[in-house]
Structures are given as structure tokens and as C-alpha cells.
Amino acid sequence: MERLFLDRDSRVHRLSPEVKIAAVLLFTVVVVITPREEFTAFAGYAVLIALVTAPARVPAGWLLRRSTIELPFVLLAVLLPIFGHGERVDWLGLSLSVDGLYGAWNIVAKGTLGVLASLLLAATTTMRDLISGLDRLRCPAVITQIMTFMLRYVDVLIDDARRMRIARLARAYDPRFLWQAKAFAVGVGSLFLRSYERGERVYLAMLSRGYTGTMPSVAGRAPAREWAISSALPVAAAGMAVAAAALP
């Protein structure tokens, strides 16, 4: 579950998780509400991401490789200028929609910045710290509890699924085609029943140990200095948005 976390000794890693979550969330909000025509503002946001990446000691190649998760949305954006309506321009023999071009830019720019910011958060914060930070930010307890249990047992479920597949292969049955999907469906159903039964046993064990419906609170709060440091990202982004809007 910690595949995205990079164990580095940096000032960004040492920041409390709640301040990093708040900073990324506010930065993303600023990016999303920025009009798509403000190209200067988006360039400034990219510079801010780079300025955070350097002290966090996160390799640029690592970010770029994992940002390919947005490729399906990029492919969708490529189609917008072709099939869009309204005013059109000619480029390399193609008739492209102006509104579609703006829409494609809007998706690619905002999506890329959001993905990069999220990857930076994941690279500098462990999953357990993220859940702890959400808890300190007063995220609904039921959500953080579900995330905690998922973090604890998802590897167990993956191991169960792997053992079931090995058992199926040991019996010389390896479904690869649509008409052989029954075995896969049966395996998924069996895995669901095992997960449900395990959840019931874990819940009863928690009740026997004094569980009352809420997880123990995490002590400690982020100092004001860390809040001030983390606020530099969204504040700078907001300043760039205002400055770009003020330009003629």
C-alpha cells in the first residue's frame, strides 16, 4: 500500500500530514476554478509544483511516469477539437473547433496539475499518515475507519485471491475466454464470502476488546509554523490567478 511513498529525508516529508492535505486541496480548488483562458496562471501553477518537487526530493521522472494514469482523459481531450461545434480553425489540413481546443486544454492542464499535486502528496506522506491527517481535519469518522480497515486488510484479500488463482491453476484450469468466465465469477463470489466472514470475525474481536464505534483519537496538532509554510502553495496559486485575471 506504500508503493507511491518515497522514503526521503526532506522538509516536505517532515511536515504534518494534515497541513499537506489542506495545502493540496486548496491548491487544486484554485486550479479548477481558474478560467481556461488564463494560460499565464497555469504556467505559474506548474512552476509552483516544480518548486515543491525540488525540496521534497521527488524525481521528475518518477512523477512523469506515474502521471500517465490520466492518459484516458487526455485521449478524450484530443477528440474534443475534432468533434466540437462552433467556430473552427484550420491546422495542418484539419478543421478544429475553437471551443473544443479550449476544452481539451482545460482538461489536460487542470488534470495534469491535479495529478502531479496528488502524486507529490502521496510521495511525501505514508498512507497511515494520510488517514491520520484526515482524522485531524475532522473528516467523518466512518470514512477514516473504512480507510483504516481497507489499508489493513487489502493485502490479505490480495493474498487470498492469489492463493485461489494458484489453486485453480494447480487443477489445470486457467480461464482466458469469455465463455470460461464462470470460474472467474465463482472465484470472485468465494472471495467476497471469505471477506465478509473475516470482517465479521474482526468486528467481534474488536467488540471483545472494548470497541465502541469510534477509533482512538490521534493526539497532537500541527504547529502554526507548519500551517504557515504549507499555506504558501495555495496562497501563491491564488495570487497568480488574481494577477493573471488582472492582465489585459
Image: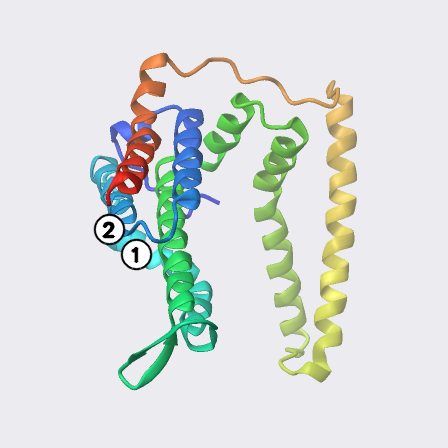
Q: Are marks 1 and 2 in contact (CB under 8 Å)?
A: yes
Quote the CA–CA distance across marks 1 and 2. 6 Å
Q: Secondary structure at mark 2?
A: helix
Three-letter amino acid code at disc 2?
A: Ala
Dividing the image into 4 quarters, which one contains the C terminus? top left
Three-letter amino acid code at disc 1?
A: Leu
Residue at 31 percent across and 36 percent down: it is 242
- The residue that disc 1 covers is 64
Q: Is residue 47 left or right of residue 169?
A: left
Report x, y in % for residue 42. 30, 48
Report x, y in % for residue 185. 74, 68
Q: Which mark is residue 132?
A: none
Report x, y in % for residue 93. 29, 86
Residue at 65 percent across and 83 percent down: it is 177
- The residue that disc 2 covers is 60
Nearest the viewer among 239 and 234 is 239
Q: Indicate the quadrant where residue 70 lies.
A: bottom left
Q: Is residue 106 above or below residue 74?
A: above
